[in-house]
Amino acid sequence: MPVSEKRRLQLRAGGMKYRRTQKGRDAMAKWLKGYRKREREKNRAHGIANKAIPLEGLCRRCRKLPAVGRHHEDYSKPLDVVLACKSCHDILDAEKVKRTSACTE
């Protein structure tokens, strides 16, 4: 059953309140450390692309909205990115997940 918008905002506020507590900060630090360890290649690619490729111009997919993110098809090629607006980046990510899951079946 879908959660109402009001309830979603209440849950989000509760999570934000928890993250401000010492226990919440400790939990987030622990999760982040594990994430960085698990996703080393992804973090490396993001760091290289963020330094080398400025976010300038329009989205390369829709060519209507300003680019707000860099999309990697392959994290082993950190400078091979597509500058994309938020909605196009979400679509590119969904397509990538679909292709990846089709390969593992």
Image: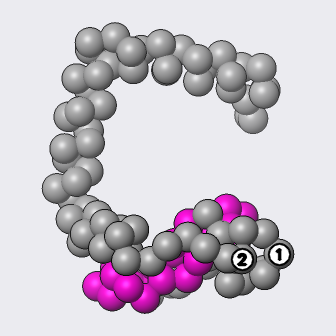
Q: Which is nearer the eye, 55 or 101?
A: 55
Q: Picture quarter containing residue 75? A: bottom left
Picture coordinates of residue 104, whole percent (x, y): 40, 82
Q: The residue tagged with tag 2: helix, strand or loop?
A: loop
Q: Does 45 sit left or right of 14 as displayed?
A: left
Quadrant, the C terminus? bottom left
Instruction: Report if residue 28 lies within the magenta region.
Output: no
Q: Amino acid at mark 2?
A: Leu
Q: Does 16 sit left or right of 32 as displayed?
A: right
Residue 63 sits above or below residue 16 on the image: below
Q: Residue at x 78, y 26 (%)?
A: 4
Discs 2, 1 touching: Cβ within 8 Å: yes
Determine which of the numbered discs, if any, sits on residue 58 in the image. Answer: 2
Q: CA distance from mark 2 to mark 1?
A: 6 Å
Q: Residue at x 39, y 15 (%)?
A: 20
Q: Picture quarter containing residue 79? A: bottom left
Instruction: Report if residue 78 lies within the magenta region.
Output: yes
Q: Residue at x 65, y 16 (%)?
A: 10
Residue 91 visible, this orientation: no
Determine which of the numbered discs, if any, sits on residue 75 in the image. Answer: none
Q: Which is nearer the eye, 2 or 55?
A: 55
The outermost residue toward the right is: 64
Q: Residue at x 73, y 29 (%)?
A: 3
Which residue range is magenta in the image? 69-90
Picture coordinates of residue 82, whole percent (x, y): 55, 82
Q: Which is nearer the eye, 102 or 8?
A: 8
Determine which of the numbered discs, if any, sits on residue 64 in the image. Answer: 1
Q: Amino acid at mark 1?
A: Lys
The way the protein has been coloured in the rendering is: one colour
